[in-house]
Each structure stands twice: as C-alpha cells, then as structure tokens.
Image (spheres, rainbow, N blue to C red):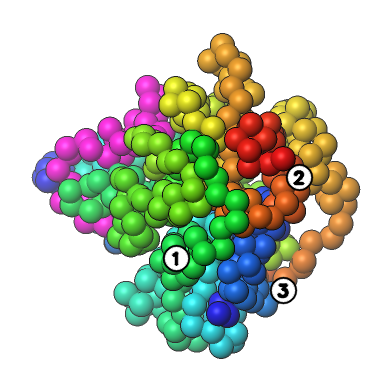
Amino acid sequence: MKVSYYPGCSLEETAAAFDISVRKVCDHLDVSLEEVPGWACCGSSPALKMDRLLSTSLAAHNLALAQGQQVEEMVIPCPFCFRRLLSAQQETQATPETREAVQEAIEAELDDSLKVHSLLGFLRYTVGLEAISAKVQKPLQGMKVLTYYGCYLVKPASVTQYDDPEDPVSMDQLLEALGAEVLPWDFKTECCGASLAVSKSETVCELSGRIIREAAYREADALVVACQLCHANLDMRQTQIGKLHGTKYHLPIVYFTQLMGLAFGMPYKALGLGRHLTNPKEMLKSKGVLQ
Amino acid sequence: MFRLKGKIEEKAFLDQVMERSGQNLLECLQCGKCSGSCPITSQTVGGPRRLIAQILNGMQEQALKDPTWWYCVSCGTCATRCPVEINMYAVSTALCEMAAEQGIEASEKGIHLFEELFLKSVEKNGRLREITTVAAFNFRMGRPFADMAIGTKMVQKGVFSPFAMLRKGHRDSRVNRIFQKIRQQQKQKA
C-alpha cells in the first residue's frame, strides 16, 4: 500500500527517533511511505496564533504538493501537523473566500482529493489490528503501560473527528494487540504544556508534572506517546519535574511505534530507543523484552 | 448576551472579533466549562470565560492585553467541551492579529518572541530549524545557558549535533513567496 508521508520539522531534527521507528514499522507492515516532495513547515502553533491566513496557507501548500503524488491517502505522525493539514482542508472547503485567498497565496489549486490520516489512526483502523498482531514475534507480555494521546490528535473533536476526545482507545487497542497490559487512567488527553516548551518552561513543568506524578502513582513501566512534543516535555523535563516534586522519577517515555518495532522483533538501537533522556533499557530488560 | 451599554465603538470591537474568528460569542453562556478545563488558566492568567466576558462588554483594551490568548496552546479542550461549540483558539488568533495591527505591545514578551523567531526560521528555510531557533530565543532572552543540562544530555544521546547549527537550511523560495503574497493581500485589505 502506497501513501503520502508528511513527517514535519521535528521528526527531521530532535524527534528523529519517532521518524526512524515510523519508517521501520510501516515498511514491516508493507506500507510504502512516499515523502511529500519538498514539503514545508505546516506553520505550527506560531502561525496559528499570529496569522490565520498564513497558517491555513502553509498547511494547504503541503496538501497541494501532495496532490502531485497521485495517491489517495496521506499519513502524518505529528498530531499538530495532522490537525493543521486536516483543518486547512476543512477551512478551505467551508468558506469560498478563505479558499480563494489561500489559493492565491500558494499559487495552486486545491482539489480536496486527499484523505488525511494521523499515523495512529491509519495503523489502528486502515492497516488494522489483525495485520499488526500477525507480525508480532516478541509479545510485550508483562509490560504495564499507560497511553498518553495528548491534545492535538483528538481535540477539538469538530476538527480531528478522531476517536473519543476524552477517553480515546485506539492506542490502547493497538498496544494490547502487541501483548502489553494497558492500565486505566484519566490523563490520556490532559495537556503537557505543548508549545510553551521553551518560552514558559515553568508552566510545562507544572502541567507535565501532573501527568508524570499520576503515572508514577499508577506504577506504570512506561508512558506511551503518539506526539513528539508531548515526548519532549515529558522526557526532557522529567529531572526538573522530579526536583520540583522533591523526588526522582524514572518513567520511560516511548513512542507507540517503538514498542511496535520491539514486538515485531526489531533491535533496540534501530528504533531510536537509545536517544531518550529517560533510558528505557533497564525496564525493557527486566520485562524480558530485551535480552 | 451583549448588554446594551457603553460606547458605540465598543460594540464594533465585539463584531470585529466575531467576524475575524468566525465564532458567535453572543451564544456564550458564561458557564465557565472552558476555564475549568483550560490547562493555562491560573491565578495570573484569567482564562477563556473571563476573556469572552471582556469582549462581550466591549473592554477592548483589557482583551487585547490579556495574557490568556498569548498562553493559549490551542489544545482545543474548551472547544470540545463548550456547550455552544465556541472555538477559542480562533478567538486567540483574531485578538493576536488585532493587537498587532493596533501596535499594542505583547503582554507576554517571551511567548511572542519565540513565536516570531519560529516563523522567521520558517520564512527563511521553509522548515523550522528547531535547535537554532531555541538557541536564538535563549540568547535574545538574555539567558544563553538556559536548559544547558538538557541540551548537553541530548548531544550525548545523539539527539542532535551542535555542528548541525552551522549547516545551511533548505532555503525554500516557495515558502518565502507565500509569506510575501500574504503580506500583499493584507496590505490591499488595509
């Protein structure tokens, strides 16, 4: 199966571990990812905050680039890029004036032909649990994990139209298909502080701190994420958060695609697992996932 | 919901926010579900319910200086839970654009600077150069060694190489042109 692939800026730089594991896992599932030729930034949160037309135009520019790929479906791992591209499609369909202004800015005609998927949604619903479990060689038995979806994948529901915005289950089902035990909790879509990562790190420490504290209380072996910004906030700030709480946390934060890769029998390093600040190696060894 | 009091131009402010954002703020029930759900509402950041109340009551100056919309991370929680489906981050964008047009100084300088540097990087390179942008931000904020411990660990783990900052970006002229085209459109409108 051939799909258009839009990695987004972070996956090219600080979240390369996500990109590496996505490509490996998709390849293993016979999904051929065709990178959008010459893709650009979707505008992310700064464009969305500062300039509506710029934000919609940058996202639509990428939709127009993908139109030339002659594929019907587009897969996006980054939840914010996913929401922005999908939203640009909806905004330009809903309002003729917006469509006209955007098409003028990007000097291209939009044909609305693409079906935009989040990577998680694509793997869970299009590839499906059956195809995924058929590839499992090393079930993640004995691993107790918490799933953390963050905001942008599911909210606002009017845009993403994906899963339940308060209690999503798609990642839970996917990890259960890999043999892991998924623990229940109420923090699946609580905010980690998102784009305040650098400019208001104290707010991030407070918000991500609530998530880490709850995950530690639930005695999870790992927190599994689907977003590189959530990953950055929860992984990189964990030492700082521990200091604020007067304790030391050691909660591995991993991408769901990395756990898929491990269950498919791929080596630890090839999935970028050695790049996280919260080292998951000891935990994986203690669970028998790694030798 | 809008109470007929105050000056005529104050009603104009409400109309402008509603038109730009596409959100019918007159439907707001002031129920407070948004602020109760909002991750960034705090003792110092008023939150969406209060911000809507300011707009409905024509308090233009307060609304355009309110830190709420600078802090807004567009998580979409309020929009998901709002009984009348007001999309608050669309309101944030409207207020941000209006404040910029009126030359009102950003109430949250740090957040503003980061977002500006981010877009500059995109305009220049077509894609964001993350590490370079973060380094530029910390330098401009007068704290060049902020998060040095995290940065050092990232380099050790091979997350990024400090030399990557020296390489040139992609330089995507098409993206640069989109920025210019939009500036043209906005000039014509004004």
Disc 2: which chain? B
Q: State which tag comes first along the sequence, 3 or 2.
A: 2
Disc 3 target residue: B173
Question: Which residue is painted at 44% across and 22% down in the image?
Answer: A217
Quadrant housing the C terminus of chain A: top right
Q: Residues within 10 Å of mark 2 (few under 14, many from 20)?
A: many
Choose mark 2 or mark 1, whichever is in front. 1
A5 in relation to B112, above or below: below
Q: Residues within 10 Å of mark 3 (few under 14, many from 20)?
A: few
Magenta region: which residues? Answer: B23-48
Please state if A170 lies on the left or on the right of A239 as rendered.
Answer: left
Q: Are marks 3 and 2 in contact (CB under 8 Å)?
A: no
Q: Which mark is residue A192?
A: none
Name the kind of residue labelled 1 in the image: Glu
Q: Secondary structure at mark 2?
A: loop
Image position, residue A169 (x, y; %): 36, 51
Q: Secondary structure at mark 3?
A: helix
Dominant secondary-structure state across the stretch colored magenta: loop
Q: Are marks 2 and 1 in contact (CB under 8 Å)?
A: no
Q: Nearer the viewer, residue B137 or B169?
A: B169
Q: Which mark is residue A130?
A: 1
Question: Which residue is painted at 23% across and 47% down in the image?
Answer: B82
Disc 2 target residue: B159
Quadrant housing the N terminus of chain A: bottom right
Name the kind of residue labelled 3 in the image: Ser
The quarter of the displayed image where residue B31 is located:
top left
